[in-house]
Structures are given as C-alpha cells and as structure tokens.
Image (cartoon, rainbow, N blue to C red):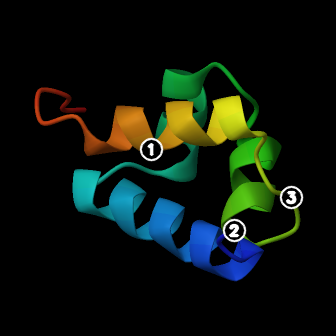
Amino acid sequence: MPSMENIAEQLKALRRQRGWSQEDLARELGVSFSTVNHRENGKARPSGLAGNQNFRLLDRNDVSH
C-alpha cells in the first residue's frame, strides 16, 4: 500500500500539472477545500473509492480548467 506521503505528493503533482488550485480540485470532486488540503498535506488518506476518483479526474487528458 502506498504511503500517505506518496499519495499526497502524487495528488499535489497531478493537480499542479493541471494548473488547478486546491479550490478548483475541491469543486471538481464535490468536496471541501479542507478535504483536498488535508489529503495533499498527508493529514488524511482518501478512501479507496475517493482516491481512485481523485486520480482518474486528474489523469484525464480531456479535462481543462
């Protein structure tokens, strides 16, 4: 299982590649800013389903903001 630090860094890197703020990502995922912030700072690990949703959204080639 990936470490929380690894998950947090991957999420942050993918979000930045998109040029999105944490607020943008929160809006796209339908979660609060604090949820995204906690995930990116390693304070909270997303559930398996939420983690998959995060990475699928950020990894899609057709999404732009």
Q: Tag 3: residue type?
A: Ala
Label 1, label 3: how many angstroms apart (C-alpha)? Answer: 16 Å
- Foreground: disc 2 or disc 3: 2
Q: Residue at x 57, y 25 (%)?
A: 29
Q: Element at badge 3? A: loop
Return the residue at label 1: 55
Q: Which mark sits nearer the N-terminus, 2 or 3?
A: 2
Choose mark 1 or mark 2, whichever is in front: 2
- The location of residue 46, given as percent across then percent down, is 76, 46
Which residue is at the far right? Answer: 43
Going from N to C along the chain, the mark reached first, 1 or 3, is 3
At a point 62% along the width and 42% down the height, the residue shown is 51
Contact? badges 1 and 2 (CB < 8 Å):
no
Per the model, the C-alpha gap separating discs 2 and 3 is 15 Å
Q: Nearer the viewer, residue 6 or 64?
A: 6
Mark 2, Cα crowd under 10 Å, few <14 / some 14-19 / many 20+, is few
Rendered location of residue 11, percent (x, y): 51, 60
> Which label sits on residue 44?
3
Taking the spot 69% from the left edge, 68% from the top edge, the residue there is: 1
Question: Residue 59 vs residue 12: left or right?
Answer: left
For residue 16, which quarter of the picture? bottom left
Residue named by callout 2: 1
Q: Position of residue 54 (x, y in %)?
A: 52, 39
Task: Give the residue at the far top of this rendering.
Answer: 30
Q: Secondary structure at mark 2?
A: loop
Q: CA distance from mark 1 to mark 2?
A: 16 Å
Disc 1 residue type (three-letter): Phe
Q: Is residue 57 left or right of residue 28?
A: left
Looking at the picture, which amino acid does disc 2 mark? Met
Which quadrant of the view contains residue 65? top left
Residue drawn at (63%, 69%), measured in percent from left and top?
8
